Amino acid sequence: MKPLKIYLQHKKQTILFFLLITTLYSFGQTVPGVFEKYSTIKSIGFEWNISGDINHNAQCLVQYRINGTATWHDAQPLFRVDFQGYDMLAGSILFLDENTEYEVKLDFSDPDGGSEIRTELISTKPVPVLPAGGNTYHVIPGSSGGDGSQSNPFQGIATAQNVAQAGDIFLLHAGDYGTGGQVFFTQAGEENNHIVWKSAGDGDVIFNQVRIEADYIWLHELNFIYENGNDYGLRTSNAPLGVVITKNNFSNCHYCIYLNDGGENWYIADNIIVGDNDPNDGSNFSGEGIELARTSGHTVAYNKISRVADGISYPRKNVDIYNNDIFETSDDGIEGDYGHNNIRIWRNRISNPNNNGISFQPMNGAPWYVLYNQVAAPGENTLKLRDRTDRVLLAHNTLVAWSGPIGSGSSLMQSFQSNNNLWISIQDRYILITDRNPKNWV
């Protein structure tokens, strides 16, 4: 009987130990902490820090409506993010109306204890519009002189900037403004009241290199033609806010739009960018079309980008990248590498990248939204997964590859939510190739 007694005592200790561990993991309630909200033109994002959710089962349901209307709409619940130092619930509401105030209800709860319902008002941003009420001046190439009138234009950008104030529009007449080297834009506008530098419509307005050094500057319908091996086209100083870059042509640039010294909340749309890379040279990893350099708050939309290494790269957080046409790149189409929370990539067309379509190498935060994109005929994979990843909503994409849409690193998809994607391999090969056990995939 002694062995049976020892067995029963051991079993009792095991049960007590199990109950102790269960109690420790469910003891105490989850406490919500710092809450952050932000927006772009089409999206709203949230980050809600929490503490105490040891077993990671806290959740937050989301509803929204245009402020003042009656009907609530369900949104995707916030994602539970415990990754790279983050301990929070985070997520976005997408495809919203621009310049509209929304009421959002966030219903946080944890089955082990802790709950809170909060209602937030937040507005999406407006699409930039040309200012009204400021002065309109005329500018021609040169170094000094003129009064800004149509009959006696300012000669040169530096001369014109001596009078520039928020809301002013400068009409740039045909000619080469880059003969003196790099052009500096140094006079700041105001939020929703930019200083605008745009083509007068009488011929090509040509720059070589420019540097944006002040907030709320708008460059429109200009030509940036790079010669003599210049590595950089448009760069920044002083982390300028709210810059607008629209309907410009960039050609023969290496780093074409490069936020090297920071910048937040830019609107980059409807530009044509043709770099200086050979799209067949898969070893050429430098030279970006739009390099966001780990900055936040941007909308990058409706651009046509080719002959660069990566079409669009390095967003930090709260960035929308949509409706861009990216093709014949020497590296990847869109590189979200090192991005943090609420990166949103949708309805982009990526064709014939020499290496990969959309890169997640690596993610520094979450969630990311990758929706309704078309990726066709990459030299390697439609999705590049070679390092850490976390929460991703991957939905409604068409992913076409020569030989398996995902190869190396596909095991990292275990933290993706993959819905309604079309995967096509031209050759008879697996959709995914993994060297890990996929039994835990969701």
Image: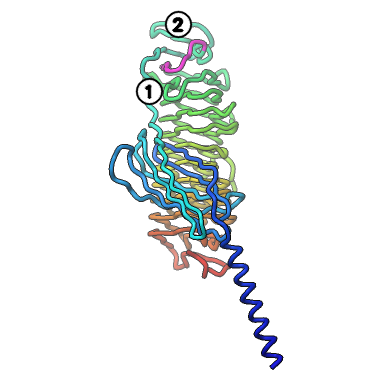
Q: Does the magenta run of residues contain 314?
A: no
For the point 36% across and 41% down, the residue is 96
Image position of 60 with respect to 216: above or below: below
Left or right? Give the position of 198 relative to 27.
Answer: left
Q: What is the magenta segment's predominant secondary structure?
A: loop
For the point 45% across and 54% down, the residue is 393
Query: Residue 224 versus residue 422: which sits nearer the camera?
Result: 422
- Check disc 1 and report the residue beneath it: 130
Question: For the residue carrying disc 1, how many other residues have a C-alpha within 10 Å: few (<14), some (14-19), or many (20+)?
Answer: few
Query: Residue 175 versus residue 27: which sits nearer the camera?
Result: 27
Query: Residue 33 versus residue 28: which sits nearer the camera?
Result: 28
* Residue range corresponding to the magenta coloring: 162-172
The image position of residue 12, as x and y in percent, is 64, 79
- When asked about the image quadrant of residue 263, the answer is top right
Mark 2 vs 1, N-terminal side: 1
Q: Can residue 374 be seen in this view?
A: no
Tell me the CA gap for discs 2 and 1: 22 Å
- In the rendered view of the protein, which quadrant contains the N terminus? bottom right
Label 2 sits on what residue type?
Asp
Label 1 sits on what residue type?
Leu
Image depth: mark 2 or mark 1 in front: 1
Identify the disc placed on residue 147.
2
Query: Residue 372 versus residue 270: which sits nearer the camera?
Result: 372
For the point 55% across and 34% down, the residue is 258
The image position of residue 111, as x and y in percent, is 48, 60
